[in-house]
Image (tube, helix red, strand yellow):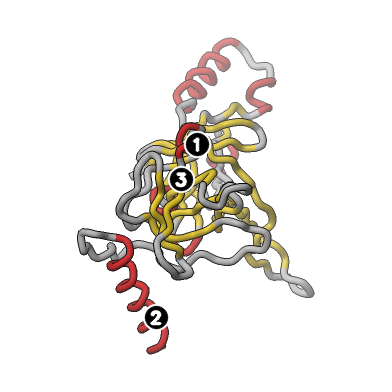
Amino acid sequence: MKQFVLFIGAIAAFMCVGCSSRNQAPEENKTVGTSTTIEGDSTLYGLACDGCTDSVLVFLPGKGGDPVTYDIINATMKRRIIGKPKVGDWVAVILNGENPQKADMVIDLDELKGTWVELVMPTKREQIATVEIDPEEKRIQDSIVASLMKPIEIGFSLKRHYTAQPYGRRYMNTTSDEESPVVLPTPKFYTEWHVINGKLVLSISDRVRVEHGDSTKMAVVGHDTIDFVLMTKDSLRLKFKDGERGFYRKN
């Protein structure tokens, strides 16, 4: 434990020297050295340093060493700078395959963290939409449905140490839910997140039966691999397999 504390202290001291000409200490909530090594991932992780512009990224590798300056002119023109890296932000860098002095993509991981939501409309229950009823009952039913057809916020939270959590999920179904004429949208149960080769990978968990037993446990059952389109301070646009979707930050 003592050696771990000394190691973290050494990193913090090195950051102060290598990443800021203003002698500012890094914020306590910055993620340092928590990226996990994933087989096949060529992403570089580290800190954005003083001197970053629209044409260059001054980058301090998370594994140690001196700051490196990467040319990001083409990445900026192609809108492959996801977020706006600030001094001390933890970032992911994808280098150009032919010129290691250039970065093809930069993702601000600190800016990516947070809760992102979208507005999704409920849907009518199939039996409600097809059953034949008299005009007065239909009028009452339509009125009830109209009052319930309001957009719902659903999404996900990306947290420190690459953990994720669904936002807007209803954990218990009640009798009233089953009798409701509309079905509320439900977000996927994301529990982990990573950036792998410039893509956002969200792990989906669900309850699975324990082998040779009657109990269940939560386990990862799948992954969504998503392309970044753009990210600003308060908006995030992602390209899923079924198309692009826009999210806004939930404070």
Q: CA distance from mark 3 to mark 2?
A: 31 Å
Q: Nearer the viewer, residue 173 or 93?
A: 93
Nearest-to-viewer mark from 3 and 2: 3
Q: Nearer the viewer, mark 2 or mark 1?
A: 1
- Lower position in the chain sequence, tag 2 or tag 1: 2
| Residue 118 visible at all | no
Q: Element type at marker 2?
A: helix
Q: Position of residue 48 (x, y in %)?
A: 38, 55
Q: Which mark is residue 7?
A: 2
The local crowd at label 1, few if under 14, some if 14 to 19, many if 20 or more residues have their Cα within 10 Å, is some
Which amino acid, mark 2? Phe
x and y percentages locating residue 82 in the rendered image: 46, 42
Left-right relation of 49 to 25 = right
The span from disc 1 to disc 3 (Cα, nearest Å) is 8 Å
Up the image or down, 145 lies above or below 199; here it is above
Q: Is residue 186 above or below residue 63?
A: above
